[in-house]
Image (spheres, rainbow, N blue to C red):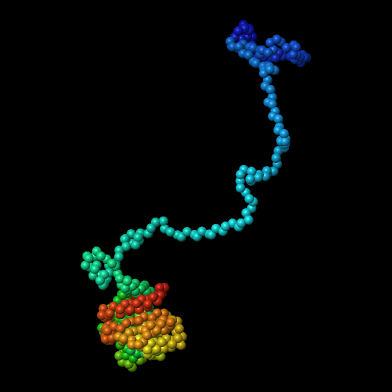
Amino acid sequence: MSDQPSTGVGAPDQPTTQLAPQGPSDPPSPAPTADEAPADAGEAPTRAFAGFRTERRVPGPERREAAPPTMARPAGMPPWDSTPVTGIPRVDPTAYGAYYTGPSEVAPMQVPPRPEPLPHTPYPELSTGMLLRPVKPPPSAGWRRLLYDLSGHLINLGESPRAARYNNLVAQVNRPLRGCYRIALVSLKGGVGKTTIAATIGATFASIRGDRVIAVDANPDRGTLSQKIPLETAATVRQLLHDAGSIERYSDVRRYTSKGPSGLEVLASDTDPAISEAFGADDYTRVLDVLERFYGLVLTDCGPGLLHSVMSSVLDKADVLVVVSSGSIDGARSASATLDWLDAHGHEEMVRNSIAVINGVRSRTGKVDMNKVVDHFSRRCRAVQVVPFDPHLEEGAEIDLDRLKRPTREALTELAAIVADGFPGDQRNPGVA
């Protein structure tokens, strides 16, 4: 059998693209001209392959698409420039409806700086004031208290303005005190109630604060401070000086003092004028060194003589000066003379920080204008306090605060609050036990 495929139906023809080999010397066949084109030139050659007849169509001249017509350029339109654009084109800002008027000539508005936010907690504190509903305190006295009790505690009108003010004074007296605060009471004239004021203000501090408060009798002319409280011991300041080296605890110094019902303690002076006259500046300094270790408040009842040797140490050690005057003309003049003497001897700052007390030693002041007296001392001192006349204080005996009239008790509390207003809050005495 021959390897050449047989021609016929089902036998594929040779592809038309396969040309017969030509020799190198054979010239190429000339392309047929239009006149020599075969009759079936419009028909594509056909071939048979695997029982199918294929036909390749060659587009004729009549099937070629014509070129698209060119649009005529309107009159007046410039020809298109086919040169590529170089650089950044300039765009008219108003071409697309933008509103642009050029650079602004008005200065920009100055915006104030915003304050920095204050630090705050992201949650409320669990304090007593936040968690508990406010409860009005019940009245303490008067018809408001009576109504509160009769209604079975259902009608609570609260404290009266007078009682509320008194409670505020008590809170002021209870100000924290670090260390020892020294108070000196002076006057050039006797009989103005200086010792009485020393005992009453000391008793007020002791009853309200509950601290250890002591009053020292530094009057060399047989002072009477020890007569204002019940006498518990016959020991005096001279005996305390003798045993100062052995005092180590509060119970040791308590052997030399007398304590009243208010809690005020008194260190008495010697009854012998010769011995009390010998109590000098160095002695007072040694006594004060002992008392400062155990007491928060030390009051010194000075004598009428400012030239006594003990007065120099008293003025140097005092934190505040209380000048006592009566409501009479001679009492006011003596108190003013005391301030003049202190100013003349280099104690100007102490005078400006001093407190003037006008003590009502008589039930009536007569024709003296107390407002003018108060105005005089208010221009020279830090504060002025008037203590009204009280029959219990006129007795000159032991002082019981519960027997004082209400105006007197309130005036003494206000005086203690004025003194407490000068308490230093940044001092510490490590020796106080």
The vertical placement of 199 against 148, above or below, is below
Picture coordinates of residue 418, whole percent (x, y): 37, 77
- Residue at the far front: name it: 75
Q: Quadrant of the C terminus?
A: bottom left
Going 68% across and 10% down the picture, which residue do you hit? Answer: 40
In the drawing, does residue 165 fall left or right of residue 342? left
Asked where in the image residue 159 lies, by quadrant, the reply is: bottom left
49, above or below 367, in the image: above
Observer-nearest of 119 and 407? 407
Residue 24 lies, in percent from the top left, at 76, 15
The residue closer to the viewer here, 135 or 215, is 135
Question: Looking at the picture, how far across and down is residue 3, in whole percent?
Answer: 63, 9
| In-image side of 10 versus 381 (left or right) | right
- 214 vs 343, left or right, is left
Residue 156 versus residue 316: which sits nearer the camera? 156
Which quadrant is the N terminus positioned in? Answer: top right
